Image (cartoon, rainbow, N blue to C red):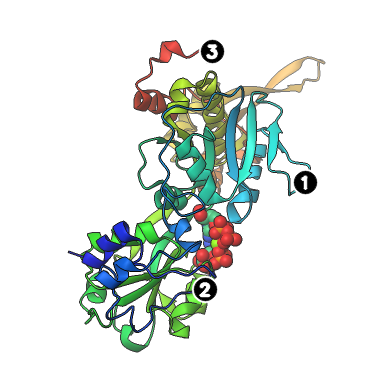
Amino acid sequence: MAQQLQAAASSRVAVPCCSTGRIARPSSSARSSSRPGSRAAARRPAPPGRLEVACSLNNSAGTTVTKPAKLEARDTLRLALPSKGRMAEDTLQLLKDCQLSVVKPNPRQYVARISQLPGLEVWFQRATDVVRKIIYGDVDLGIVGLDMLAEIGNDDPDIVILHDRLDFGQCHLALGVPMGGQFASIDNLEQLRAMPWSEQTPLRVVTGYQNIARKFFAEKGFEHVVLLSADGALEAAPAMGSADIILDLVSTGVTLRENNLKQIEGGTIMHSEGALVANRRALLERKGLLEVCHELIERLEAHLTADKFYSVIANMRGSSAEEVSQRLLSAPGLAGLSGPTVSQVYTMGADGRAQPHLFAAVICVPKKQLYPAVKEIRKVGGSGVLVQPMTYIFDEEPARWRQLLDTLGVDPKSVDVA
Ligand SMILES: Nc1ncnc2c1ncn2[C@@H]1O[C@H](COP(=O)(O)OP(=O)(O)OP(=O)(O)O)[C@@H](O)[C@H]1O
Ligand SMILES: O=P(O)(O)OC[C@H]1O[C@H](OP(=O)(O)OP(=O)(O)O)[C@H](O)[C@@H]1O
Ligand SMILES: [Mg+2]
């Protein structure tokens, strides 16, 4: 099944690529006699440069590197962050929102510090390199998109995901198929596969995600696929005639639409957003790393949870705190995270003494439910509704911390995070 795709994995010549960054269209000979997997293709040397991006365990020379048997000794812990691209700014903003500002005096500086975490160095790397450096243990922690993790990390057992929903960089990896021409009536993956692809006219897919694409088309039973490589503006390739379809990231869908491409049913490969990841051996062996992870997870969870809620304060008339609470708890969506806080409001009486007046109710309301909640508050006798953003919600021990310890097989009592 899917011989061409499997051959691509081993010979690295089945997927036509080029070193210029432009799309390498398979030449007529590549599409016939030098087809992927053929003897001629196997003899041809792998093109330099671009292939390295597509192969997770290659060094810059394109040769396979074995992981070091042991972690290199060093005094500091290391966190890698994306140095450029869409993730870079949002990653720094997220850390800032967690009161972990990264001090980076100029954009060409690749190492920085976070004053709240003195033992930790921050290294700025291209997103692909964040993943590679995690795998090899050059850095201990990293923030990167799940798409890069899947493409470069390739399910490497040394990668541990500490947090997979950092709430930024949300997008999905999907096929983009022309709206017209031979694809006009193609609405799903089954129909795409059933098209008359052959050795002579394979489905030409341009993508920066060669590993993911190879696996996807093999799993879906496509037999005649050629993967092409490009560094950007992939959406132009079908109109240009250099590829039939694309496999790329989609968030708003505007780029697809503007280039007359559509998504098809079954053509979504994965969801992606920012994730915090770590090297497994580093977690087990580097002194102090688990404690840093605990702090990062706690801060991230406190911020990310709080970011989904508003704190709502309303004046409530009533005979007692219990009676007011009863009304609130009976209304839909006003129970807060663990019940409303109801307290007495006092005014100055004519005798110069504080007099019980109204009650004040404080409720945590999901941002998306704010307006319905305000209407419910009014229905149960509330007025003067104040809405404030929430900064942090530090709850019980985060579930993600416990999951991390379980994944590593570490006894919680052995980590001092009190
Ligand atoms: N349209 C998008 N919406 C949301 N997140 C995206 C989008 N495009 C990319 N990302 C996320 O940002 C990461 C980095 O992509 P980006 O294109 O910014 O950088 P790059 O590809 O490394 O750099 P460049 O494209 O400049 O060579 C991706 O791996 C993905 O997780
Ligand atoms: O669905 P949309 O919101 O339109 O976003 C999708 C586009 O965003 C990314 O490109 P990017 O802007 O990073 O440019 P690039 O191709 O140069 O990487 C991605 O490669 C798509 O082209
Ligand atoms: Mg990009």
* Secondary element at tag 1: loop
Which image quadrant is residue 195 in?
bottom left
How far across and how far down the image is residue 161, in percent?
43, 37
> Sequence-wise, which precedes: disc 2 or disc 3?
2
In the displayed structure image, the side of residue 137 where residue 92 appears, left or right: right
Mark yes or no: residue 131 visible. yes
The residue that label 2 is drawn on is 22
Disc 1 marks which amino acid? Asn
- Marks 2 and 3 sit apart, C-alpha to C-alpha, by 54 Å
Foreground of the two, 358 or 342: 342
Rendered position, 332 above or below 254: above
On residue 298, the disc is none
On residue 106, the disc is 1
Foreground of the two, 345 or 117: 117
Q: Nearer the viewer, mark 1 or mark 2?
A: 2
Foreground of the two, 403 or 220: 220
Q: Nearer the viewer, mark 3 or mark 1?
A: 1
Q: Is mark 1 within 8 Å of ligand 1?
A: no
Disc 2 marks which amino acid? Arg
Q: Is mark 2 within 8 Å of ligand 2?
A: no
Disc 3 marks which amino acid? Ala
- At 28% from the left and 81% from the top, the residue drawn is 32
The residue that label 3 is drawn on is 418
* Secondary element at tag 2: loop
How far across and how far down the image is residue 407, in percent?
35, 27
> Sequence-wise, which precedes: disc 3 or disc 1?
1
